[in-house]
Image (cartoon, rainbow, N blue to C red):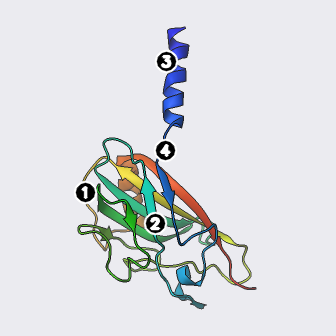
Amino acid sequence: MKQIILTALMASSLMASSFTLQSNDLEGQLNKKQEFNGFGCTGKNMSPELHWTDAPKGTKSFAITVYDPDAPTGSGWWHWLVVNLPKSTKNISSDASAQSKLPKGAVETMTDYGTASFGGACPPKGDKDHAYVFTVYALDVEKLDANEKSDSALVGYMINQHVLEKATMLSYYGRDK
């Protein structure tokens, strides 16, 4: 009986998490502001405003990733990776990547565009709408050993070794046929 009660309490505490990611710029769909400018796309390539609440106890820093699992690469496409956001960070302003408005100490690492900055959506013409997974991670370390040349797979590995909890938003984008 004690085991059943303990299991129920643990499950309810895991489900009670309220770590939440939101954006005033994204409403389920990306737009021309978040579309890449290149590869045949003509958007403004602006990183969206993001804000989060109720990070778990023990959070020492945050990381942000934007990933397209629908990219026709066999391994998806990393659009943005930011690590070493101080634990006091609660939001990122619109176009923070291009305007260097990330908090002091934050590091943008290499994306699949080959740059250490936000790279907007640019699905192939005629393809289905792609999902874009925006995730903020609460980490148990103040800093990851990453720099602007760090590869996305390595950064993903480092994040996953230190994640306390994550909050995710999903948005979609497709180009005219």
**Mark 3 highlights which residue?**
6
Distance between the alpha carbons at the discs numbered 4 and 1: 24 Å
Q: Earlier in the sequence, mark 3 or mark 1?
A: 3
**Mark 1 highlights which residue?**
143
Q: Residue at x 47, y 81 (%)?
A: 46
**Viewer-closest of 83 and 50:** 50
Amino acid found under the numbered disc labelled 3: Leu
Above/below status of 117 relative to 151: below
Q: Give the image quarter of residue 170.
A: bottom right
**Viewer-closest of 54 and 110:** 54
Q: Earlier in the sequence, mark 4 or mark 2?
A: 4
Above/below status of 118 relative to 163: below
Whether pointer 4 and pointer 1 mark residues with C-beta atoms closer than 8 Å, the reply is no
Per the image, label 3 sits on a secondary structure element best described as: helix
Per the image, label 4 sits on a secondary structure element best described as: loop
Q: Residue at x 29, y 67 (%)?
A: 106
Q: Residue at x 53, y 29 (%)?
A: 12
Question: Dot 4: few (<14), some (14–19), or many (≥20) neighbours within 10 Å?
Answer: few
Q: Earlier in the sequence, mark 4 or mark 1?
A: 4
Per the image, label 1 sits on a secondary structure element best described as: loop
**Mark 4 highlights which residue?**
18
